[in-house]
Image: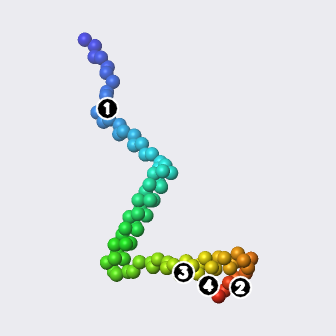
Amino acid sequence: MPLQKTKARSLVKPAPLIHQDRPTFGTIMKEGIAFGVGQSIAHRIVGGLLGATPTPTPTPSTVSNNLEYVQCMKESQNNVEACKHLQ
């Protein structure tokens, strides 16, 4: 009885290909926003623990002075010297 030749089968399976997607613009934006929010929260927590004071909000008199300065600049055709007293 003649011997039949059979092909040897490999016992080792090839490793599956790893498919890596390139990040999209939206993915990068999401990660950036999440990072920024996390940084902001951490900054506030550490600032609170160390007793940092928040930035003061503008008072009505500051806003009024700013409006007067803008009006003076319009009337004087952007002459800084004419409106220097309002700075």
* Residue 59 x/y as whole percent: 49, 79
Q: Which amino acid does label 3 sit on?
A: Thr
Whole-number angstrom distance, CA of label 1 to CA of label 3: 82 Å
Q: Quadrant of residue 19?
A: top left
Q: What crowding class fits label 3: few (fewer than 14 Cα within 10 Å), some (14-19), or many (20 or more)?
A: few
- 21 left or right, relative to 65: left
Residue 13 vs residue 40, the one in the foreground? 40
Q: What crowding class fits label 4: few (fewer than 14 Cα within 10 Å), some (14-19), or many (20 or more)?
A: few
Whole-number angstrom distance, CA of label 4 to CA of label 1: 84 Å
Check the image and name the residue furthest to the right: 77
Q: Which of marks 3 and 4 is nearer the N terminus?
A: 3
Please tell me whether mark 2 sits on a helix, a strand or a loop: helix
Q: Is 40 rendered above or below residue 22? A: below
Q: In which quarter of the image is residue 71?
A: bottom right
- Foreground label between 1 and 3: 3
* Residue 5 x/y as whole percent: 32, 20
